[in-house]
Image: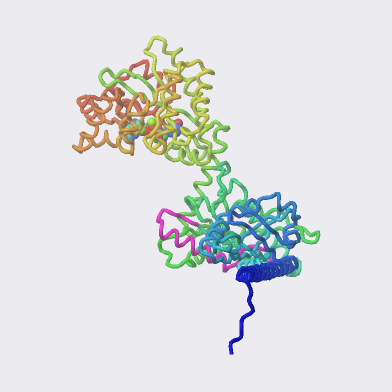
């Protein structure tokens, strides 16, 4: 049987279908929105109540949302967070790390766990552990990042404390044996890599410490140890540190540690020689010697200190510790309250050097310096053209000391700059006096030596001007002698200083020329007046063909550069002849005269030098 379909018009059917479709779509939209809303509510509930700080940022890193935990952990209100840049609150050292993590998360879609520091509103730093995850848009592109930050400041602090305890002595807070050995190993390794690197170890032991424990009780003894550690630490922190009273470099890489009991070590990562370590030891000794008060009782403490230097014979880092211990026991054996260097020869040298430095500081005021003058003559006529001022130290116990023995120490202690100033004045006054007493003779010039440190000292020009002004000497009568090493160390500064001196009208001579490291280009750049050929070359011209050739080359070079040439250290007539043949115009040396005092120099000028040797006072 055929059941007929109800006859619905086709148009109505289409409308019905369309209606149903729209209905279905609306239901879908409604459900999706409801889900999204539910998700949002859930997100809200989770984030608002989470202990962690949750942030939503867009791909450019702009804040879209910060959970309330931010206020609790970092102290900023939501409004304040809106006004501040998240980036600026991050510790500068961690910013790159954070940026990088953001980039990786955006590009790979996978966040990485990361630790960074962020500033609390009160200015302190909090440590956060953070992890980012990405939120994609409908086309699958990363649209946002959800960042969950956990405040791990306390955990970090506890970890650091634990680590600190592992490496520090609980009584004094100083590094303990473990940390000390670690640093010692580093110094040892460095000295193996770099053979020129010198480190030193001081081992201090409190004299008769047992007595303090017995009389003050262990708690009192502990207080004494705490005070000693404080003073040892403080004396190393002093800015003039390694020791020379006026060198402004802080003690480089010094580690003070308590090895246990009443034993302290100081590792000096970089020292020049044993006298540097000795200076540190003496300063510590002095700091510790001040009275200590324990429960109102005054106690006096002293240390016996052993000093050892890193040496090639050491096979293991601990070997230096053994050396220092031997030296320390020697210090005890000699009555305590003193320091001893492991190597006795080194000890003698270091003590001598320290005594010399101490004496130097008072030598100017005690008028112990004298100036000797050595003539420079024109080889063809033997006429004196200038006099080189050479310092002598008339030491109360040691007699006349050569500048070779004290110039370096004077430079290291900073005494040389004031000594140089004194010498400038002295030489200029002398020049005036000679002018008056030798009015009939030819006027001479005076040359002064300047060391590297004097040369780079800003006071050089003003000290010179001051001396010239005070004495009324014409600048053209003054010449400075600098060595090649000065010029090689800093050619730019050299040009600046030399140009300034030239401007003042003062001449400059390159001293000890021919043995150092001057570059030809430098020589070309420097506004010099003369080259002084080093005396080792002059000595060798008689015996060594190569030396003669070098001297010849120097003379040719000088004539090209329009510089005068002076040969120093001439001791024989034969040398004079040879030098003249090579074209050298001026000379200086024992053959003409030793350095002599001002009065004798005047005599020489008056006589205009007979070619016999004039004997002056030498120096040891
Ligand atoms: P220098 O500037 O090269 O001075 C020449 C040195 O050679 C002087 O030694 C002089 O006594 C010595 N001498 C002179 N003629 C002869 C000779 O015929 N044979 C030999 N063997 N030696 C001779 P001195 O006075 O002991 O000075 C040594 C160095 O100390 C000087 O070398 C100079 O670099 C430095 N010096 C001296 N006085 C001063 C000063 O006031 N300031 C500075 N910064 N350095 C100075
Ligand atoms: Mg000289
Ligand atoms: Mg010289």
Residue furthest top as drawn? 440
Q: Nearer the viewer, residue 519 or 340?
A: 519
Q: Position of residue 91 (x, y in %)?
A: 62, 54
Question: Which image quadrant is residue 190 in?
Answer: bottom left
Q: Is residue 181 magenta?
A: yes
Locate ligand 1 by image quadrant: top left
Q: Is residue 590 above or below residue 309?
A: above
Residue 170 visible somewhere in the drawing: no
Tell me, yes or no, if residue 413 can be seen here: yes
- Number of numbered discs visible in the structure rendering: 0
**Percent of width and height locating residue 167:** 61, 67
Residue 134 figure quarter:
bottom right
Q: Is residue 9 left or right of residue 388?
A: right
What span is in magenta? 171-199
Residue in view at x 27 percent, y 33 percent: 538
Q: Nearer the viewer, residue 14 or 400?
A: 14
Locate residue 301: give its quadrant.
bottom right
Q: Quadrant of the C terminus?
A: top left
Q: Position of residue 101 (x, y in %)?
A: 55, 60
């Amino acid at each position: 049987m055929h059941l007929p379909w109800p006859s619905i018009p086709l148009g109505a059917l289409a409308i019905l279908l369309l209606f149903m479709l729209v209905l279905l779509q609306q239901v879908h939209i409604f459900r999706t929105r409801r889900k999204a809303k539910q998700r949002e509510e859930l997100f809200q509930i989770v984030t608002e109540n989470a202990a962690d700080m949750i942030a939503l940022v867009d791909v450019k890193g702009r804040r879209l949302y910060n959970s309330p935990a931010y206020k609790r952990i970092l102290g900023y209100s939501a409004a304040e967070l809106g006004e501040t840049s998240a980036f600026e609150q991050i510790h500068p050292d961690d910013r790159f790390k954070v940026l990088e993590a953001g980039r990786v998360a955006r590009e790979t879609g996978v966040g990485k766990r990361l630790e960074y520091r962020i500033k609390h509103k009160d200015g302190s730093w909090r440590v956060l552990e953070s992890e980012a995850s990405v939120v994609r848009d409908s086309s699958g592109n990363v649209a946002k990042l959800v960042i969950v930050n956990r405040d791990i400041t306390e955990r970090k602090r506890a970890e650091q404390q634990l680590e600190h305890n592992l490496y520090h002595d609980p009584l004094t807070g100083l590094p303990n044996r473990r940390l000390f050995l670690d640093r010692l190993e580093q110094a040892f390794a460095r000295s193996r890599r770099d053979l020129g690197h010198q480190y030193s170890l001081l081992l201090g032991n409190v004299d008769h410490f047992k007595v303090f424990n017995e009389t003050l009780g262990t708690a009192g003894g502990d207080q004494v140890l705490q005070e000693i550690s404080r003073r040892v630490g403080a004396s190393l922190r002093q800015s003039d540190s390694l020791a020379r009273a006026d060198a402004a470099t802080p003690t480089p890489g010094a580690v003070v540690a308590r090895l246990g009991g009443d034993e302290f070590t100081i590792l000096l990562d970089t020292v020049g020689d044993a006298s540097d370590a000795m200076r540190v030891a003496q300063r510590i000794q002095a700091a510790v010697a001040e009275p200590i008060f324990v429960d109102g009782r005054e106690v006096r403490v002293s240390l016996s200190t052993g000093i050892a230097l890193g040496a090639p014979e050491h096979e293991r880092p601990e070997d230096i510790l053994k050396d220092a211990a031997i030296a320390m026991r020697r210090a005890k054996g000699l009555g305590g309250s003193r320091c001893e260097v492991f190597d006795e020869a080194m000890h003698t040298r270091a003590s001598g050097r320290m005594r010399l430095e101490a004496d130097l500081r008072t030598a100017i005021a005690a008028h112990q310096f004298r100036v000797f003058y050595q003539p420079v003559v024109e080889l063809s006529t033997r006429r004196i053209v200038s006099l080189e001022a050479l310092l002598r130290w008339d030491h109360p116990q040691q007699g006349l000391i050569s500048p070779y023995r004290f110039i370096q120490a004077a430079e290291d202690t900073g005494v040389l700059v004031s000594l140089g100033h004194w010498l400038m004045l002295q030489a200029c006054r002398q020049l005036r006096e000679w002018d008056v007493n030798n009015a009939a003779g030819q006027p001479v010039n005076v040359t002064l030596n300047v060391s590297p440190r004097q040369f780079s000292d800003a006071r050089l020009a003003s000290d010179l001007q001051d001396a010239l002004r005070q004495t009324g000497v014409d600048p053209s009568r003054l010449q400075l002698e600098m060595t090649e090493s000065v010029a090689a160390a800093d050619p730019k500064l050299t040009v600046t200083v030399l140009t300034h001196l030239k401007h003042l009208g003062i001449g400059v001579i390159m001293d000890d020329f021919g043995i150092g490291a001057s570059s030809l280009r430098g020589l070309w750049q420097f506004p010099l007046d003369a080259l002084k050929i080093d005396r080792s070359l002059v000595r060798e011209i008689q015996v060594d063909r190569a030396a003669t050739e070098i001297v010849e080359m120097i003379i040719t070079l000088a004539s090209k550069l329009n510089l005068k040439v002076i040969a120093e250290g001439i001791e024989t007539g034969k040398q004079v002849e040879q030098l003249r043949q090579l074209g050298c115009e001026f000379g200086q040396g024992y053959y003409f005269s030793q350095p002599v005092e001002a009065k004798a120099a005047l005599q020489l000028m008056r006589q205009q030098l007979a070619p016999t040797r004039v004997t002056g006072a030498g120096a040891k």
